[in-house]
Amino acid sequence: MENHKEIELQLKKNFGHFSDDLVQEILAHGEIVFFPEGELMMDIGQKVEQIPLIVEGNVKVFREDEDDNEIFLYYLQPGEACAITMICSAREGFSKIKAIPMEDTRVIVLPISKLDEWMPKYKSWYYFVMDSYQDRFEELLKVVDGIAFKNMDERLLVYLKKSIKANGSTTIHTTHQQIAQELNSSREVIGRLLKKLEQKGLVRIGRNYLEYFGK
């Protein structure tokens, strides 16, 4: 019963556009799951059996190749779900992305079978899924545009702006190596670019963190 009350409160807070009948379905089939900061939430090749609706926290989503090279895609925050996970589950059943909570995160998980079942039944679910697809598609286009058309210094600035927006803080807890991995660059290049930004007064570099003062 407590689980139902918590789910109902979280749905009202983060998914207020869901219709009452959809909320009842989610109460009947959903459950709250907790993921500590840094714990792998989804891995590439993992069987996708649930749809996670983010209600608390902040999740970073990556792509990774067979040589463990990573590239940052986007953040997931309360009120959102991972459209790539939805697509993978609907088509093949295996994840194409890696997802890691950047802080303690809580999600409402739903059986993956409900993804298609609810599409024709509930307009609010249909629009939520379609909007999720569109939002993530636009994020992926930005990633492609960044790789194809922007210099690394421009991509680094976009990365920093996304990070402070997602974290709700000008302080980013990360290392030069982590940034390099996520931008598919080298530690030396990122270190050099950050030093230039520091000289311009846009960042302050600390041990395993940096502060960004740009707009």
Image (tube, helix red, strand yellow):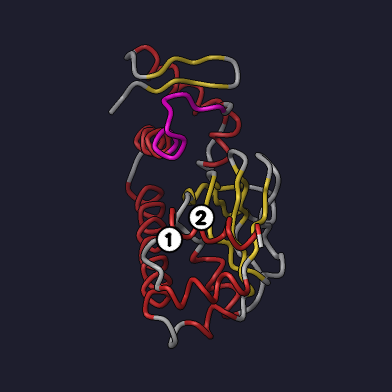
- Residue 124 percent coordinates (x, y): 38, 74
Q: Residue furthest front?
A: 1
Q: Quadrant of the C terminus?
A: top left
- Residue 2 percent coordinates (x, y): 65, 57
- Total marks in image: 2
Q: Quadrant of the N terminus?
A: bottom right
Q: Do the CB atoms of the residues marked 2 and 1 lie less than 8 Å apart?
A: yes
Q: CA distance from mark 2 to mark 1?
A: 8 Å
Position of 62 compared to 18: left or right? right
Label 2 Cα neighbours within 10 Å, binned few <14 / some 14-19 / many ≥20:
many
Position of 28 compared to 147: left or right? right
Q: Amino acid at mark 2?
A: Gln
Q: Is residue 171 magenta?
A: yes
Q: Please determine whether, in this image, residue 75 is positioned above or below residue 168.
A: below
Q: Mark 1 = which residue?
A: 15
Q: Residue at x 56, y 60 (%)?
A: 7
The residue stretch that appears in magenta:
163-173
Examine the image and state in which quarter residue 188 appears: top right
SS category of the residue bearing label 1: loop
Examine the image and state in which quarter residue 175 appears: top right
Q: Amino acid at mark 1?
A: Phe
166 or 14, which lies in front?
Answer: 14
Q: Residue furthest left?
A: 215
- Residue 189 percent coordinates (x, y): 50, 28
SS category of the residue bearing label 2: helix
Q: Mark 2 = which residue?
A: 10
- Residue 149 percent coordinates (x, y): 32, 48
Q: Is residue 183 magenta?
A: no
Q: Residue at x 39, y 23 (%)?
A: 212
Label 1 Cα neighbours within 10 Å, binned few <14 / some 14-19 / many ≥20:
many
Q: Residue at x 39, y 55 (%)?
A: 139
Q: Please determine whether, in this image, residue 72 is positioned above or below residue 22.
A: above
